[in-house]
Every structure is written in C-alpha cells, then in structure tokens.
Image: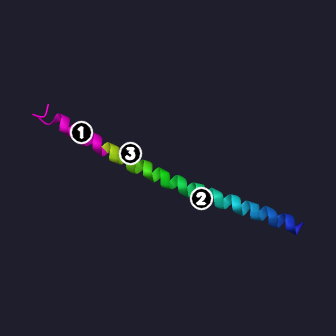
Amino acid sequence: MLEEIMEVKDSTMKTLNETIDLQQRTIKQLREIVFLTEKHADIEKQLLELQTKPGLN
C-alpha cells in the first residue's frame, strides 16, 4: 500500500515538474511574441511617418 502511494506521489511530482516546465516555456514564448509584436508596431509607425512626410512620395 505504501509503495503504491509512493509510486503515485512520484508520478504526480513528475507530471507537476513537466507542467511547470511547459508553463515556463509558454511564458518565454509569450514574451517573445509580445516583443516581436511591439517591434512590428514600431516598424509600422516608422513606415507611416515616412509615408506622410512631404516630399518623399
């Protein structure tokens, strides 16, 4: 009985560690998405400013 409980505990800990790892990777990817989205917005803003400057068209 105790051995079964320990096996379940070990399995649960492994699953929790895998879940934490996946969450950390997801957070890292979401931060990268935010960074790239902000960079894209900055580039779009710069393009719009260039398009609206007189004498460049």
Q: Is residue 10 above or below residue 44?
A: below
Answer left or right for 49 relative to 3. Answer: left
Q: Residue 5 in the image: state x and y as whole percent.
A: 83, 65
Q: Is residue 21 magenta?
A: no
Q: Earlier in the sequence, mark 1 or mark 3?
A: 3
The residue pinned by badge 2 equals 21
Name the mark on residue 47.
Answer: 1
Q: Residue 41 in the image: state x and y as whole percent.
A: 32, 43
Q: At x 53% / y 52%, what residue is drawn?
A: 26
Q: Earlier in the sequence, mark 2 or mark 3?
A: 2
Among the 4 quarters of the image, the one containing residue 16 = bottom right
Q: Is residue 43 above or below residue 15?
A: above
Disc 2 residue type (three-letter): Asp
Disc 1 residue type (three-letter): Leu
Q: Is residue 54 above or below residue 8?
A: above
Among the 4 quarters of the image, the one containing residue 51 = top left
Measure the alpha-carbon separation of dots 2 and 1. 39 Å
Q: How is the image coloured?
A: rainbow
Q: At x 75% / y 61%, what residue is drawn?
A: 11
Q: At x 57% / y 55%, what residue is drawn?
A: 23
Residue that extends furthest to the left in the rendered view of this protein: 55
Disc 3 residue type (three-letter): Thr
Answer left or right for 45 relative to 3. Answer: left
Q: Residue 55 in the image: state x and y as whole percent.
A: 9, 34
SS of the residue at dot 2? Answer: helix
